[in-house]
């Protein structure tokens, strides 16, 4: 297998959708309150056991929510494990919080691909043109919707032109 040239593998946009800072102390506070209730309600259990179990569990439950990556390369748009070849992107709309609410509410489609995080207001809506795929669009949360939309339009234009060329 021949390695790809660096120009083909450089990402036009990269972003990691991490949790806000306050989620970590809130999780620890919730786990502490639950541990205290178990400590008070179950006197036969050793005092340290609820704290030793629930505090690490409170942190471990947040780790999967903190790993979502968004990346635009010259060949594809990656959202976590999902991959979309850029030649099927027909348009991109940067959405503010109200636009995201509209796109995911009444204006939504049941076959739309949605990756949204409630703590992130803006998003992008990626319109698709793939006859083999029934998915009409993707809605993806992002903290930088204009930059992501611009990167997607920059890489999808040449890819669509290459797809339609004879």
Image (cartoon, helix red, strand yellow):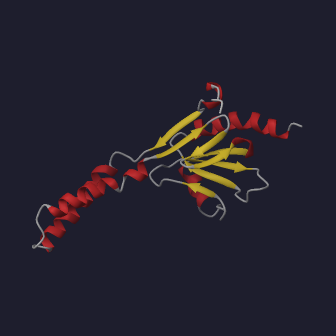
Q: Is residue 101 above or below residue 13?
A: below
Residue that lies at the very extreme toward the right in this rendered image: 166
- Return the x and y of residue 129 as percentages of the image width and height: 76, 50
What residue is shown at x 70% (from left), y 41% (from top)?
86
Q: Nearer the viewer, residue 106 or 29?
A: 29
Q: Nearer the viewer, residue 119 or 129?
A: 129
Q: Image check: 158 left or right of 65? A: right
Q: Image check: 25 left or right of 39? A: right
What residue is shown at x 66% (from left), y 48% (from top)?
126
Q: Is residue 31 above or below residue 78?
A: below
Q: Nearer the viewer, residue 92 or 52?
A: 52
What residue is shown at x 10% (from left), y 73% (from top)?
44
- Return the x and y of residue 75 as percentages of the image width and height: 68, 37
- Return the x and y of residue 48 as percentages of the image width and height: 13, 60
What residue is shown at x 21% (from left), y 63% (from top)?
33
Residue that lies at the very extreme toward the front in this rendered image: 1
Position of the C terminus, as image quadrant, is top right
Res 104 → quadrant = bottom right
Res 160 → quadrant = top right
């Amino acid at each position: 297998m021949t390695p790809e040239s660096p120009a083909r593998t450089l990402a036009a946009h990269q972003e990691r959708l991490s949790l806000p800072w306050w989620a970590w102390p809130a999780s620890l506070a919730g786990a502490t309150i639950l541990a205290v209730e178990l400590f008070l309600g179950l006197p036969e259990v050793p005092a340290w056991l609820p704290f030793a179990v629930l505090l690490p569990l409170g942190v471990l439950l947040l780790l999967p929510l903190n790993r979502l990556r968004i990346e635009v390369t010259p060949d594809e748009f990656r959202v976590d494990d999902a991959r979309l070849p850029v030649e099927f992107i027909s348009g991109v709309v940067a959405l503010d919080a109200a636009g995201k609410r509209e796109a995911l509410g009444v204006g939504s489609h049941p076959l739309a691909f949605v990756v949204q995080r409630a703590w992130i207001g803006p998003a992008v809506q990626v319109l698709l043109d793939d006859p083999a795929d029934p998915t009409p669009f993707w809605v993806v949360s992002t903290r930088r919707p204009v930059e992501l939309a611009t990167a997607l339009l920059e890489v999808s234009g040449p890819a669509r032109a290459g797809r339609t060329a004879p």
